[in-house]
Amino acid sequence: MPRVNVVKKAAKDYPEQGIKKGDAYYWWKFRFGPMVRSKEHPKPWQLTRSEFYSTLYQIQDAIGNIKAEDVEDLQQQVQDLAGQIRELGEECQEKHDNMPDSLQDSETGELLTSRAEAMESAADELEGIDFDNFEEPTDAEVREELEGELGDEKEPGIGEEELKKRKEHNTLLYAEKIDEIMQERLQEIIDEVQNVSLDAE
C-alpha cells in the first residue's frame, strides 16, 4: 500500500476534491500513478490496486459497520453480504479456470484457488447464522427487567391525574426496555457476523 501523507494547510484550492486553501488533507500516490488527494483519511480499498482486495476491504468495512433496525433487516443485510462474498470467490475461481492448464497449478493459480475457497467458506458461515431462534422478549421478561421501576397503577387512593402520569411513565419505560432487549439480541447476532473470518492471501 502507498504511504499516506498529511498536509496541515493546503497551499491552494483543489475543487475536484472539495479542498480549499488552508484545509488539511491527505495525499498518496501509487507507483507510476498520479497523486491522489482527499479531505478524509483514505479507506483501505482506496489504497490498493488489487480488484480482489478493493472489493474485499469494502465488504469488511460493511460488516464492521453493520447496523439493523430489526432482525429482518439484519438477515437481509447478511444475505446480501454473503452473496457479495460468494460472488467474489466465484470470480477468483473463474479466473483460475480460465488460465492455461499449465498455469493452474502455478503460484498464481494456487492463490486464486485459495481465495475462492476462503470466500466460499466465509459465505457459507454467514448463510449458516441462525435467525430462526431470534425471539422478541415476552411481557414477563420485560416486567422482570423493570422490577421496581414501574409505577403502581393499582395503588389505592391515587387520583386520575397521578394514574395518568404513571401509565404514561410505565408505557414509555416498557417500550424503551423492549427496544433495549431487542438491540442486545440483535447485537449478539451482529457480533457473530463480525467474527466470521474474511482473511485471504
Image: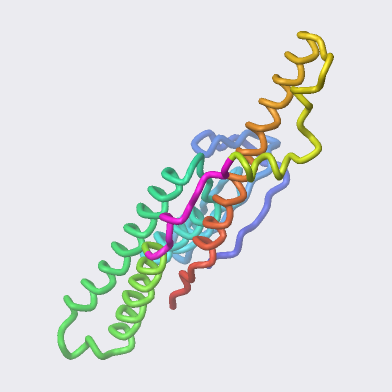
Vertical order, 189 against 172 (above or below): below
- Is 54 one of the magenta-colored residues? no
Q: Quadrant of the C terminus?
A: bottom left
Q: Quadrant of residue 51?
A: bottom left
Tell me which residue sits at (39%, 56%) in the image.
81
- Please identify the dominant SS of the magenta region: loop
Q: Which residues are magenta?
A: 128-138
Count of numbered circles in the view: 0
Q: Nearer the viewer, residue 133 or 72?
A: 133
Q: Residue at x 67, y 53 (%)?
A: 6
Is residue 136 on the magenta stretch? Answer: yes
Vertical relation: 74 (above or below) 128: above
185 relative to 32 in the view: left or right: right
Direction right: furthest residue: 157
Name the spot of residue 138 as percent of width and height, x first: 57, 43
**Is residue 39 visible in the rendered structure shown here?**
yes
Q: Which residue is outermost to the top?
A: 160
- The x and y percentages for residue 160 are 76, 9
Whole-percent x, y for residue 98 in the image: 17, 76
Q: Is residue 129 above or below residue 114?
A: above
Depth order, front residue of 67/55: 67
Would residue 49 be visible to someone looking at this image?
Answer: no
Residue at the image point whose x is 62% and y is 45% from the top: 181
